[in-house]
Amino acid sequence: MYRKRFNLLALLVTSSMVLASCGGTTATPTATTAPAVVATATTAPAGETPTAMMAESPTAMAGETPSAMAGQTPGGSMDRTKVGAELSEAYAGKYKGTKVTMFGPFGAEDEIKFNNSIKDFEAATGIDIQYEGSKEFETTINVRAQGGNPPDIADFPQPGLMASVAKTGKILDASKFINEAWLKENYNQSFIDIATVDSGGSKILGGIFQRVNGKSLVWYPKKAFEEAGYKIPQTWDEMKALMDEIVADGDTPWCIGIESGTATGWPATDWMEDIMLRTTSLENYDKWTKGELPFTSPEVKKAAEVMSDIWLNDKYVYGGRKQIVSTSFGDSPAPMFQDPPKCYMHRQGNFITSFFEQSKPGVKGGTDYDFFYLPPIDAQYGKPFLFAGDVMSAFNDRPEVRAVMQWFTTFEGVKGWVQAGGALSPHNDSDPSAYTSSVDARVADLLRSATSLRFDGSDLMPGAVGSNSFWKGMTNYISGSATLDQALEEIQAGWANVQK
Amino acid sequence: MQGAAELRPQRPIPGTEGTAAPGRFLIALLALIAVVAALWLGFLFLRDNDAPQLVSALVAILWGVGGIAALFTTANMLVESLSNKWRSRVQPYIFVGPAVAILAWFLLIPTIRTLFQSFFLGSSNNFAGLENYIKAFTSRDMLQAFQNNLLWLVAGTAGCVVLGLLIAVLADRSRFETLAKALIFMPMAISFVGAGVIWKFMYARQPEGEPQIGVLNAIVTGLGGQPQAWIQSPPWNNFFLILVLIWMQTGFALVIFSAALKGVPEEMLEAARLDGASEIQAFFRIIIPFIQGTIITVTTTIAIFTLKIFDVVIVMTGGQFNTDVVATQFYKNYFNNPGYGSAIAIVLFVAVLPVMIYNLREFRKQEGF
């Protein structure tokens, strides 16, 4: 009798273990009754992004910057109360000994650069910023937010993902503790628009941009490139001619790698976006990022085909398709720095220079490597430029957290990183002379001179598409386990998974 | 239980010998209340403290282990101060109760919640009926995951059991039995995540003409072949992932089989040999039937492992390249769409359930429960 009953109990217990061990422990969610209000995912972004953004460039290295602001040192006389009360109190030492935890996707070189860039702030305020980086950031941040264990501040490279998290009501409204006048003064309105998201039915400022990076860039090993007599292509035809010339010389034009843990596939989405911008209108691009232009449409398919012409041609890519899928994005440009180079071009955002240093210590921008703008494909669409950026979002409301968030809205908050290279400042109070690397200064220039500017599309799309089915579909297509049509259908199916 | 009570040195308390002891009851009750209060204070400290992590960790260990011991001791004291009749009624629940309560809180309730959630759209309160389940059984991703899980179940389980049994039998006759068993058992000490990382290096691929850092590709290129993208090329990549499980779990099967083999009576085998049975016949007609119960237990245990497999896949391929299994699908979908993710979790749960019931039945047959 007893035995039977205990048996049943044991079964119950062990079987519920299966579920729980698979993640059932995160059973807090329904408590935060997400509103029934249907909020179309990330309504804010690109659509409204005015091309006027060009006029007042986000990096605003132009002369409009009030000279009093430029080149402030951390101990300087900048009026910090303008940003927010907590920031000036922090500098007054009021939060000495407190701790602010941060969680983000970057690691290795970037983590070192970040930690160096916060040193002055930590020394001046006594606030200890503890950064933790994870390759699994995209999924882990959801686990931590819903499990009630979020970091104080998270670094989202995808505003779309931030928007999905904000929907659960866990992210604080940054406009509540950062002076609105300051935000307007120091940011181009587009940055505020992109980060304005839905939270429990109302609009909040889900975060603030701490740094941005340009994406439509092709890196090349300068010396070898010039010695071989190659010319920087200005048009797509010249680009094709260059690729064939390199092949004719017995070399390989491109180095490409898409491996990135659960995020495998994302470099392919960047290519897609760059090509979309060059083969169709901005209106279509904006519709696409909002889910109004399906992946199965001829426009998107055309972009994928232009990409396939390069990617799936084993002569054009070092190591061919197999190499693309099995190489991590960070390691992929390394063969470019061998002597002689194993490939001559690598398309990636300017953050990749951190990885250059990792794969070959001591390489210098401007001498060892350089970049050119990925040429336009169809002249009627001008010279579009793709960029991305990192949004800092606060989860816990404590004065020291507010202070750190406020600090990130100032140029000081990214200055150290800008000086180390690999990041651009989105702030209007940035100091052009801080760009110690001519490469970064020129990327900032490009950002200014592009005829149109768009944020990374997959990063704007909601998490279920932008950081799930889009990655997976591209990976399946490139690895050869799905045809292009199958892959595009699969990516499009991700929209059905977007939380309503 | 009563034996334990009798063994306890009886300290004579003046004036209470031999009678029912209201004084003892009161003391025990106070002690229990004190322990509960102390545990609550400890909980508050652990929740709100700013102490260094090492201190927190030490307090947590002390709080957990010491707290349980103190709780049981005082609760037991309380029970023992009761009359004999009540003591035997209550005592089992004192020991089993807390464990069951904690398991119910952390496992049963989440299970029910997950089931509940799986009938709703996203994280909303909009009832979805069976929509999430229909999607879980029709989407291309999930069909792929089911197919892969089936592969894991068949190839993974068979690999571990057959290899484990084979090595156990061979090692039984070898002079190096201990050494061989130790070597094969060793991977058990590594976590699935650790094993995934190790094997990712084993399968690493560099472009043709470069020195290969992955063992497998180094061998292949050494023999004049081309480097392969082992874990990025479907459908074979699934087998390369399954190999990691086999590497890890064969040791588990081996050790248990080995112990069972030692239980096969030598006389029986000798009699068979005298009757002219070959070694192979003796193996299949005597050894296998004799250790059948063990084989079933090991098989079902590993089968449950393979159905729940997650770590190896997420570490090595992130579920990309058509290697997704049900558990990784659940993980990826839950946070974008909790309703759908919950439905996948329930599907996995239902799939594991029959194996688990069978496993427990076998345990009971062997008086394991």
Image (cartoon, rainbow, N blue to C red):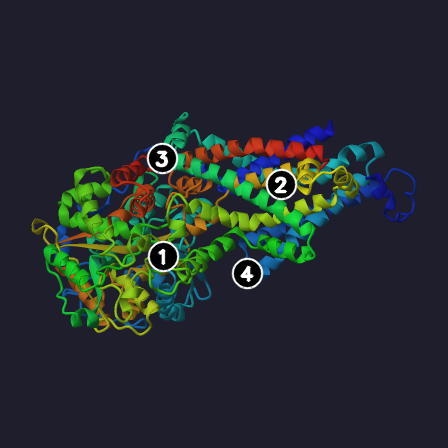
**Nearer-the-camera pick, B268 or A303:** B268
Residue where numbered disc 4 is placed: B53
Quarter of the figure that contains the C terminus of chain A: top left
The mark nearer the N terminus, 2 or 1, is: 1
Image label count: 4
Report how far apart the C-alphas of labels 3 and 1 lie in the structure: 32 Å
Which amino acid lies under the numbered mark 3 shown in the image of this protein?
Arg
User: What is the chain identity of the residue bearing mark 1?
Assistant: B
Mark 1 residue type: Gln
Q: Does residue B16 appear to the left or right of A376 in the view shown? A: right
Do tags 4 and 1 sit on the same chain?
Answer: yes
Q: Position of residue B341 (x, y in %)?
A: 42, 37
Give whichever of discs 3 and 1 has the lower sequence position. 3
Q: Which amino acid does the dot numbered 4 rest on?
A: Gln
According to the image, label 3 marks what residue?
B140
Which mark's residue is nearer the viewer, 2 or 3?
2
Count neighbours of disc 4 (C-alpha within 10 A) and say few if under 14, some if 14 to 19, many if 20 or more: few
Q: Are marks 2 and 1 on the same chain?
A: yes
Residue under pointer 1: B226
Which label lies toward us, 4 or 1?
A: 1
